[in-house]
Each structure stands twice: as structure tokens, then as C-alpha cells.
Image (cartoon, rainbow, N blue to C red):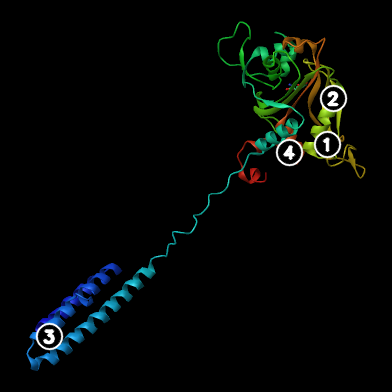
Amino acid sequence: MDEIDRLLDQAQTEIGRCTEPDQINAIEIAWLGRHGKINQLLQKIKNVPDDARKTYGQKLNRLKTAITRQLADQRQRLNKQTDKTPFIDLTLPGTPYPKGSLHLITIAVEEISRIFEKIGFVRVSYPEVEWEYYSFASLNMPKGHPARDDFETSFIKAPADPTYGKMLLTPHTSSGQNREMRRLHGQPPIRMINIAKCYRPNWDATHTPMFFQCEGLCVDKGINISNLKGTLNYFAKEYFGADREIRLRPHHFQFTEPSFEVDVSCNLCHGRGTINGKKCKVCKSGWLELGGTGMVHPHVLKEGGVDPEVYSGWAFGCGIERIIMMKYGIDDIRYYYNGDLRFLKKF
Ligand code: DAH
């Protein structure tokens, strides 16, 4: 009989020590299970003298009830404790990282490439670290020619090449013209679009030392200024909008003859230059300067191995940052490169 009281003590201590639901389950099996202690004690009832059997049975029943209740109490206590720790649902998706996006220059480069690819132009890529020859001499600017001064150029401290001259950071994408003509062994048709980084040591609201240019070159039999105008007009309408027009103004470039500057009609005043009798604030004259262009100079064709007696061509070059500014009305080129996400996120 005393043994039963002792067992109740033992069970209480064991249950009280449980910190995990699994431990409670194990105790439940050990005490109340089919082969558990209580059942073993019940089987012993036949050895108990007749007069004590009733009390023995009652004591065992009380032990069973007490253990059952204590197991339930301890379970509840543990549940309450775990309720305090925050519930973590491991199946929920994690917090997403903020999504990146393409830089607006990359977007423009892709857009411009697609526009020219639609009419058969091939996008090419030529070195940024270039030889003097490709950036100047091949473009009808021989050594010592004053036109070279227009392109303030950063030279690289490296041994010069006897044929190609000094090494430099190319100041314009026109350096790709000769490379493209040579790539095709002087055999037109040539329809090149070369979009690349260029370098000139300027830094203000409209210039950064590194900038992007887009160069177009088209050489074939019978190519004339109408083709040039038609292509640039097509580009302006595709890139800026169907209501935009272009115009050519006579200019001088060493590598084209005749040469022009290309303007695009202003999207605010549509080429009129005034709005309700007042000067347009964006363009002042009705037109915005897009870039330079002209018919490829015969010397440039010859240098690329193309026969200028048989073939003719046009070329154009424009700054990517500038045309993006014209499209969206951005007024400071430095926004592109200062990494301000408030600006970059808008594109
Ligand atoms: N390379 C000239 C510049 O950087 C732009 C240019 C003008 C390119 C006329 C051309 C062209 O292809 O025909 O200022």
C-alpha cells in the first residue's frame, strides 16, 4: 500500500520535470500504457489478501486518476509557455529584396539598337581604348590637323605604335567607322550602329568625362542625302514620337562632306519656338540639337578600303545622354551617374 503512495510521489516528480510534449507522452506510456506500471500493479491484485483487495483497487484507481490529471496539467502549462514564443510559419514566403531595374542609359541603348535593327542595321562594339589612327587619321584628320583639337583627348601612357600612333581613350564612336569598313573588307553594304562609351575631360551640367555616343554608318551604291534624312526622320519619330520632325543645318566635320547638324523639333512648341506669343522655355528656337551627320568623306571611304567611285555613304553621331535629356526633359546630365535611386527608379 505504501508502495502506491511512493509511486504517486515518483510520478509527480517525473511529470513536473517535463519540458517537452514528447517527454509527457513517454511518461504517459510508461505509467498508463498497456504494459505500463499501473497495469502491472493491477495484475498483482490477485496476490493481495481478500480483505485488502478492495482498498488496493481503490488506491490504484486514485493513482491512475491523479497521474492522468497531472499529465493534463503539465501539458497545459507547457502549451502556455510555448504560446509566449512568437509563432514562426516556415512556409510563408520571405521578405523580398527590392527589385533592381535597368539604368536609363541601358534602356535607351537597347531602345535605339532595336529601332535601327528594324531597318537592317547591325549593332557592333569597338575598343574604348583605341589607337590614334582610328580616332583621327582614318577620319581625315592627319597628324597635326587642327580639327583634332575639337576632341580634347586623354592619351594613355604606353608606347606608340609605328602605324597606329598613340593609345588613347576614344573621344567619339566615329573611330568604329574605319574598323567596320575593314571588318567587311571594304565590301558594302554596310549598315552599322555603334553605341559605346567615349571620353573627354569635361564636367558640367551637360558634360561628363565619360559619356555614351551612338554612331550610324550606311555605305552602299547610290546612297545620298535623302537616305540620310529619311533614316534620321524615321529614328526621331520612333524614339521621340510620331509628331517629331528633323531638320539639317549646314556644318563642318572633317570626316563628312557635306556635313550637317541634325535638329529635332521641340515637343513643347512643335518647332514654332513660341507658345502663346512667348519664347518656348525648352528650346527657344523650336528645335533641339541632336548630333552631327553628313555624307562620308571620300578619304574616309578610301582609308577603309571602300572605293569612293563606286560607293557612297552617310554617317551620324550623337550623344546618348543628350537625347535621353531631350526625350524626358532632364536638365542635368549628372543625374545619370550620381546613383540617386529616387531619380533612377522613375525609369
Ligand atoms: N564624332 C562627332 C563628335 O563626336 C559626331 C559626328 C559628326 C559623327 C558627324 C558623325 C558625323 O558620324 O558624320 O562630335
Element marked by disc 2 = helix
**Label drawn at residue 283:** 1
Residue in view at x 56 percent, y 10 percent: 159
Q: How crowded is mark 3: few (under 14 residues within 10 Å), some or many (20 or more)?
A: some
Q: Quadrant of the C terminus?
A: top right
Tag 2–tag 4 contact (CB < 8 Å): no
> Rounded to the nearest whole Å, what is the CA distance between mark 2 and mark 3?
114 Å
**Residue 183, image quadrant:** top right
**Residue 237, how many percent across, how many down?**
82, 36
Residue that badge 2 annotates: 227
Residue at the extreme bottom: 51
Q: Are marks 1 and 4 in contact (CB under 8 Å)?
A: no
Residue depth check, mark 2 versus mark 4: number of the one nearer the observer:
2
Which residue extends farthest top?
A: 162
Quarter containing the N terminus? bottom left
Q: Does the residue at mark 1 contact the one at mark 2 (Cβ under 8 Å)? A: no
Q: Nearer the viewer, mark 1 or mark 2?
A: 2
- In space, the residues marked 1 and 4 are separated at their CA atoms by 12 Å
Q: Determine which of the numbered discs, if any, sits on residue 331 in the image.
A: 4
What residue is drawn where x is 73% and y is 10%?
303
Tag shown at residue 45: 3
Which residue reaches farthest right?
Answer: 277
